[in-house]
Amino acid sequence: MLYYALIFLVVGVIAGALNMAGVAAVAVLISWILFLIGIVLLAIHVHESIRPGTLNRKIELSQSPSSLDEQPLKWSGSFR
């Protein structure tokens, strides 16, 4: 998301340098909107990842790990 914001910002700066005011204004506006959406998504991600109890979540397996080791995966040599 932030990558696209940077691309539109560069397009806006180049368009502004070439005196294309309408294109520059639209490109800068799109880059600003994408930047804000990226920052909001980043804030949501950081908030969700540091909540208490989410870092030490235990994964429950339907089978015990020892029963998974009894049948190793074998490659048949073909993708068909």
Image: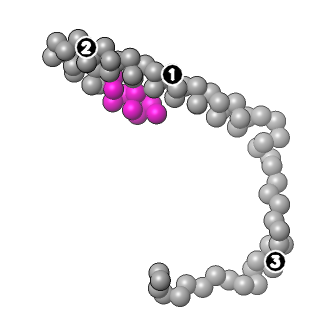
Position of residue 54 measured from the top left corner of the image (x, y, whole percent): 78, 42
Q: Which mark is residue 56?
A: none
- Quote the CA–CA distance across marks 2 and 3: 65 Å
Helix, strand or loop at label 1? It is helix
Which SS does the magenta portion mostly show?
helix
Q: Residue furthest bottom?
A: 76
The residue located at (80%, 49%) in the rendering is 57
- Quote the CA–CA distance across marks 2 and 1: 21 Å
Label 2 or label 3, whichever comes before in sequence order:
2
- Quote the CA–CA distance across marks 1 and 3: 48 Å
Position of residue 41 measured from the top left corner of the image (x, y, whole percent): 58, 30
In the shown orientation, is residue 44 left or right of residue 61? left
Residue nearer the viewer, 57 or 31: 31
Question: Residues at badges 1 and 3 in contact (C-beta under 8 Å)?
Answer: no
In the shown orientation, is residue 54 left or right of residue 42? right
Helix, strand or loop at label 3? It is helix
Of the residues shown, which amino acid type is indicated by label 3? Ser
In the shown orientation, is residue 23 left or right of residue 33? left
Range of magenta residues: 1-9
In the shown orientation, is residue 26 left or right of residue 46? left
Label 1 or label 3, whichever comes before in sequence order:
1
Identify the residue under disc 1: 36
Mark 2, mark 1: which one is toward the viewer? 2
Label 2 or label 1, whichever comes before in sequence order:
2
Q: Which mark is residue 22?
A: 2
Residue 78 vertical position relative to residue 16 in the rendered view, above or below:
below
The residue located at (27%, 16%) in the rendering is 24
In this rendering, the count of numbered labels is 3
Identify the residue under disc 3: 66
